[in-house]
Image (cartoon, rainbow, N blue to C red):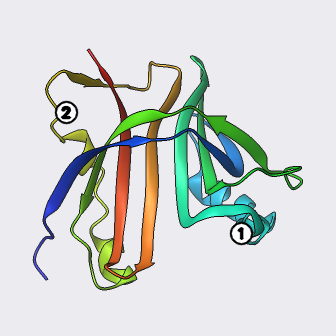
Amino acid sequence: MDKPKVISFTIQHEGFCFLGIENLVTENADFGAFWGNFFDKGGYEKIDPYQKDQNCINVWFNKTPEEKIYCQGKIVNEVPEAPQGYTLTKFPASEYLVTTTEWLPSYEETMQHINHDYYKNAQVPQGYTKCNETDNGIFLIERWGEKTKDGYRYEFWVPIKKI
């Protein structure tokens, strides 16, 4: 298949609860170690009983202006108590610019077409601006759309706000 068509659209996403594992991102962050730790602690199996959405997401946010956090997990319903080593975080509603590809037929093909330039180069709708890494809060959500009736795709969600 040639390069898939890149698609961008905006959505309003309600506030959500996220259950996952937080990782402090530094200049020398080891994402392999982040993922090893995630699966050593139980991975998605500890989250699945509470999942509201079967799709896995990674949330990038600033806890404070000095702390960039990368979390692996899922959107969940209310959780009575987070499993040991996991964090339950409530994020507010926001508008997002979603950038992705058309639906692809397989996991392998989707993995070949994950490209961060898609969202970095996406046009923000007129009258909006991207929330970026210097803002507190979420600055990127990576959402894995798998095994849907339409196929597979990897989505980048960038919060936007009216100017």
Q: Residue furthest left?
A: 2
Residue visible at 66% across and 45% down?
A: 17
Taking the spot 89% from the left edge, 53% from the top edge, the residue there is 84
User: Which numbered dot is residue 48?
Assistant: 1
* Disc 2 residue crowd, few under 14, some 14–19, many 20+, Cα 10 Å: some
> In the rendered image of this protein, does residue 71 appear above or below residue 15?
below
Q: Tell me residue 75's x, y (percent).
A: 61, 54
Q: CA distance from mark 1 to mark 2?
A: 34 Å
Q: Residues within 10 Å of mark 1 (few under 14, many from 20)?
A: some
Name which residue type carries label 2. Answer: Val
| Residue 50 placement (x, y as % from top left) | 74, 62
Relative to 125, 142 lies left or right: right
Q: Is residue 79 left or right of residue 72?
A: right
Residue located 79% across and 50% down the image: 86
Whether pointer 1 and pointer 2 mark residues with C-beta atoms closer than 8 Å, the reply is no
Earlier residue among tags 1 and 2: 1
Identify the secondary structure beneath mark 1: helix
Q: What percent of the width, then of the height, locates residue 45?
A: 75, 72
Image quadrant in which the C terminus is located: top left
Q: Which residue is mark 2?
A: 124
Report which quarter residue 107 is drawn in: bottom left
Secondary structure state at the residue bearing disc 2: loop
Labelled disc at residue 119: none
Picture layout, residue 104 above or below residue 14: below
Q: Amino acid at mark 1?
A: Asp
In this orientation, which residue lies closer to the viewer: 24 or 6? 6
